[in-house]
Amino acid sequence: MAIQVAGKTDVGCVRTNNEDNFGYDTRHGIFVVCDGMGGMAAGEVASKLGVDTVLDYFRKAAQNGSFPEFGKKAEDLSQMANALGSSIHLANSMIHESAATDSTRSGMGSTIVGAYVKEKFLSIGHVGDSRIYRIRKGSIEQLTEDHSLVMEQVRRGLISPEEADRSDMQNIIIRALGSEDTVEPDLEDLVLEVGDIILLASDGLTKHVKKDRILELVQASRSIEQAVDALIGAAKQGGGNDNITCVMVRAVELPWYRRLFGGLRDSWQSSTG
């Protein structure tokens, strides 16, 4: 199995600055999207710290041959999921400490979604309302649950999903990187199949482009690069009142000549608006 990836961020139609960041490193199989928040330019700082910390964690772990543990270990999850969790705990600490030592960054924070791929295994983690979807065999499934006020109300049966979509409180999140000295990421282990597409996205995409429309646009695209462009275009057509970011990861069968002569060329990217 091999991995193809495409990612893009866009300021949208209303905002003048981009507080989203994304990054990936296919050599280590790590993919991240962060959506920052805070006054001045603090949101951009928080999201960049989140992305850079997670990528750096996996690169240093590969060099040192071990995954340092941060936060509480989940005994029922794999080493992969716990490594991703540790990187998220570390990112939380970095953002929280930066905000505490610089008054211009007070109150800054960020959402995060991360995917860690190794061979046919996938571990995901998130904090906040950025999302991960999986497209498999013509269907789409949301793999994460938003840490937002309206979705907590949905989970408790206080409002319907349709009412949540119309709520004026959609942007209120109840869990974020940097808001407290500790954080509890949601983590999960999954199996990756050839043909799977994993989409990591900020809410600037998902509040304008619902999952059925996401599936339509991806299926109509000739490549994941074209699909990413189509998704961002659809979000802008829907209003684009927030920054829009998505990273798309596709599992493909490794060509015979690469199985014979070696794996895919290593690549990495970190991007901000």
Image (tube, grey):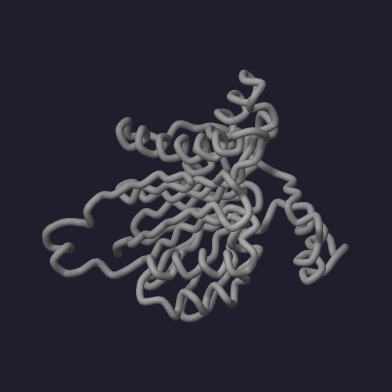
> Quadrant location of the N terminus?
bottom left
User: What is the total number of numbered labels drawn onto the structure image?
Assistant: 0
Quadrant of the image occupied by residue 207:
bottom right
Q: Is residue 4 above or below residue 110?
A: below
**Left or right placement of residue 211 versus residue 82 in this view:** right
Q: Residue at x 58, y 24 (%)?
A: 98
Q: Residue at x 42, y 57 (%)?
A: 7
Question: Residue reaching furthest top?
Answer: 101
Q: Is residue 31 above or below residue 91?
A: below
Is 263 or 77 nearer to us in this picture?
263
Residue 102, percent from left and from top: 62, 20
Q: Residue at x 32, y 37 (%)?
A: 62
Is 69 or 197 nearer to us in this picture?
197
Quadrant of the image occupied by residue 166:
bottom right
**Left or right placement of residue 37 versus residue 253 in this view:** right
Residue 54, percent from left and from top: 46, 39
Residue 243, percent from left and from top: 58, 53
**Left or right placement of residue 264 versus residue 204 in this view:** left
Q: Is residue 153 above or below residue 105?
A: below
Is 130 or 80 nearer to us in this picture?
130
Residue 209, percent from left and from top: 61, 69
Q: Residue at x 45, y 37 (%)?
A: 52
Is 37 or 198 nearer to us in this picture?
37
Question: Residue reaching furthest right?
Answer: 158
